[in-house]
Amino acid sequence: MRTQLSAQLDALEQTTVWMLRTGATDPNAVLSGSTPYQRIWGLVVGGWLMAKSALAARGLDDDGTAETQLPLARFYAEQLLPQAAGLVGAATAGSRDLFALSGEALGNAAARGVRV
């Protein structure tokens, strides 16, 4: 869990640095990557909370909380947390493709029956 959380924190930091640098000159690029960026944040914070709860449950010897919390945290770290790194490209892709077609071009495509 520690290795995976550390790797995804690095991905979040890399993306945050890009967002801060790029936002000063190209706010559209940052806005176009905001949804995947928020997803990265959610995955990393979820991983941190799962790891924290697994550590807290280790010291408990009550109703089986530790027995269930550790496998849940491990599952999150191995199956869900790695998705954060996969979102870095989408978060930092910029806005070029979003503005590649003009409204007129989109209107013409719709008039020809082309799905956009």
Image (cartoon, rainbow, N blue to C red):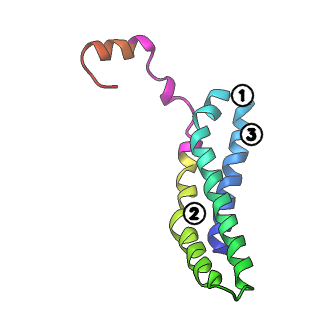
Q: Position of residue 2 (x, y in %)?
A: 67, 74
- Where, quadrant-wise, is the N terminus in this rendering? bottom right
Residue tagged 1: 25
Q: Residue furthest front?
A: 63
Q: Position of residue 47 (x, y in %)?
A: 64, 64
Crowding at label 3, few (<14), some or many (≥20) Cα neighbours within 10 Å? Answer: few
Tell me the kind of residue under disc 2.
Leu
In front: 10, or 69? 69
Name which of mark 2 and mark 3 comes first in the sequence: 3
- Of the residues tagged 2 and 1, which is closer to the observer? 2
Q: Residue furthest left?
A: 113
Q: Residue at x 56, y 68 (%)?
A: 76
Residue 105 position by quadrant: top left
In front: 105, or 48? 48
Q: Which residues are magenta?
A: 90-104
Tell me the kind of residue under disc 3.
Leu
Compute the Cα span from label 2 to label 1. 31 Å
Q: Position of residue 30 (x, y in %)?
A: 64, 34
User: Is 96 part of what is drawn in magenta?
Assistant: yes
Residue tagged 2: 81
Element on which disc 2 rests: loop
State the mark number for residue 20: 3
